[in-house]
Image: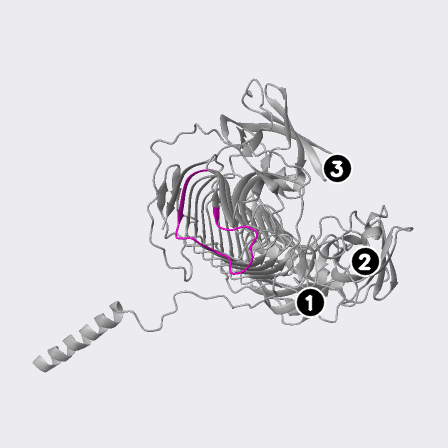
Amino acid sequence: MKLRLLALLLCLCMLVSVGCGKPDAVETTTEPEEVTFPIIPLPSTPTSGTESETVPESTPDTEAETEDVLEFPLFPTDPIEGSSVGKINISTASGSITGAEDIEIPRPVLNGNTLSAEFYLSPNKTGEENAAAFAEMIALVKSSYSETPITGIDIPTGTYRMRALKSYGVHLDGIANLCIEGNGAFLLFEETTTSRYDPSYFHIENCDTVEIRNLFLDFDWESYPLYVIGEVISADPSTNSVTFRIDSHELPDTVKVGGGRSWDPELDNRSDTVGFVAYHSATSAEVLDKHTLRVTYPSPKSAERAKAGQQFQFFFQANFKASGFDIFYCKNITLDGITIYSTPYEAAWCGATDGYHVVNCKVIPAEGRRFSTYTGFETHAVKGNVIFENCEIYGVLDDNIHMSNHFMGGENVKIDDYTVEMRHLQTWSTKYYFEEGKILGLYDKNYQELGWSSAIVSVTSVKEPTNEMATYTVTFRDPLPDSLPEGCKFFSEDYRDGSFIIRNNSFGGGLCHALYIGLGNGTIENNTFDNFAYPSLILTMVTRWDRWHIGSGVENVVIRGNTMTRCNTAGRDPASFAVVAGVDKNPSDFYPADGYVIRNVLVENNVVDGSTGSAFALFSAEDIIVRNNQFLNSNTLPTTKPRRVGWGNAYVSNARNITWANNEIQNDGHAYENGLYVDTATVLNFKEQD
């Protein structure tokens, strides 16, 4: 008996030691697939730019409160492996820094009642027939709600041509608890013979808990290529025309030039100093043969500057100018394992949706192409949670991920005690904020609260003649202040509680920004960015180019463990990595706001390497911790803004309560700027720690 008891005791001890000990090989996180982009050296002979006009910087009130300001302790660095969401809690003078709380977006619950698409779709059907088959399946799903709901649509592996019946390939409206399983099927969307209004591959509205997964989506480039690089053959100023050779793709009989940018083949990206510059939009384009295109401009200026051998990146505008996904007024939408080779417009647009998860998705060019989509993921009017994780995005002409709420800051004119005309607003960005009962708050030109808010009683809108803008006439429940200050803004107070996570993604080869973010309560971590024409990561509140009014409540954000290489090839303001607020004038001339707009941000363990301009910029912000970052090999081109000459590889201006700790600034080769610059006239309580 004693021997048995002893044996049992030994077994129990072994079990306890196994249960409490840490095994040798435990996977705590799933690492994304590593994507390696070719390293192309920066140009060895920099060229300088000029600034046409120097406008004096504005400065905040130097008598701002400085007493009782919290001194930040130097916290130990948290592990960067995997997600650190919810592990940070740092108190500051104006609040705290936690980043996004852990987020989970609900997915559909399947009941086994699945509709097999093999009885509807076919590789042998026309695009119209397959689109009609999709519509039939969606109708069956909706009709099933009165009995046993259909919770799944299963698409067999294969290639299916799709042509929009109206503006959409697939239309989901009022669908709940549905998973569309693609099984690696390929949907090829065709050009249409006539223009479509706001088209998309998938149009999703008023849906709740829908998941679309494991699909490949593409546009039919054989009939109409979307994005190509042309090389100048000749130019004729007498006809205002330039002739290009297009070797990568065969041209259709007719194309419409939607725009384009000068191209530097050595950088494999756009440049404002190398390549053909089109000074105006094209008035016409004539296809001379399958590889030759003659483009006419409204004046001889473009043709006079054109030289044989210069390259230009074209985008051709399709009749079916579709986004991959349009998502409106939904809840809990998941895109999982979707590969988008190309769209004529955006990879996905999402507006006024609570719960949006993009995971394991790719937006990448198909073999033989350099470009994928015009724009990546646009996400606006965020009132819930958004997650982008484990995705790969490459070859996008505009922003990879642009995510923000908007304010009404075009021009606000008081009509009577209860009514305001809000002018010069782009409808796509502001239409979500004007529903009856929504609360708007009043802010000054520097984004500071003025202590007034009220609910909307009624609203009407009139389209303005230019730039797709509109004037909204808004009547409030409560009387307005006696006068509205010049440059004031109205913010939607109903869009303040959302949060976002952007983690473990790979961004590369982009012709604009990688991340342009105007939201608070977020975590941006463990992403890689390589070869971007514009600053790769901007966290901001800004009036940009007098058209876009971006950001609301940008505070409580953690930016950590990201790597940015070869960024800002076009040399744009304010830096490759920026936490800033103010006014960005066209083209890219960023001036700070008076006051402290961005609050409670932790910037740590990031690497910025190979930037043409400054690596890092911080202004119009307070309670910011910048620690353990590497800012390497920046300012490889001369500073183009005279007001910032001498401002170094990293700079801080118009800020308060800043901790700068253990950051490395180093240039291995020649640099036009060096070191850290702190504008002592406009920065209060700057703490530098080793």
**Of circles 3 and 1, which is in front?**
3
Q: CA distance from mark 2 to mark 3?
A: 34 Å
Q: Is residue 393 above or below residue 591?
A: below
Which mark sits nearer the N-terminus, 2 or 1? Answer: 1
Residue that badge 1 annotates? 121
Callout in the foreground (2, 1): 2
The tag on residue 466 is 3
Residue 307 disc label: 2
| Lower sequence index among marks 2 and 3 | 2
Local packing at callout 3 (Cα closer than 10 Å; few below 14, some 14-19, many 20+) is few
Tell me if label 3 and label 1 are in contact, CB under 8 Å: no
Colour mapping used in the image: one colour
Residue at the (59%, 18%) spot, across then down: 417
Amino acid type, callout 2: Lys
Q: Was residue 75 drawn as part of the magenta stretch in this picture?
A: no
Q: Nearer the viewer, mark 2 or mark 3?
A: 2
* Residue 662 part of the magenta-drawn span: yes
Report the label total. Answer: 3
Q: Residue 168, which numbered label?
A: none
Q: Amino acid at mark 1?
A: Leu
Of helix, strand and loop, which one carries label 1? loop
Q: Quadrant of residue 591?
A: top right
Check disc 3 and report its element: helix, strand or loop: loop
Question: For this rendering, which residue is in front, 168 or 320?
Answer: 320
Image x and y of residue 435, in percent: 59, 34
Rendered image quadrant of residue 227: bottom right
Q: Nearer the viewer, residue 418 or 48?
A: 48
Dot placed on the residue nearer the N-terminal end, 3 or 1 = 1
Q: Is residue 438 visible?
A: no
What segment is highlighted magenta in the picture?
655-676
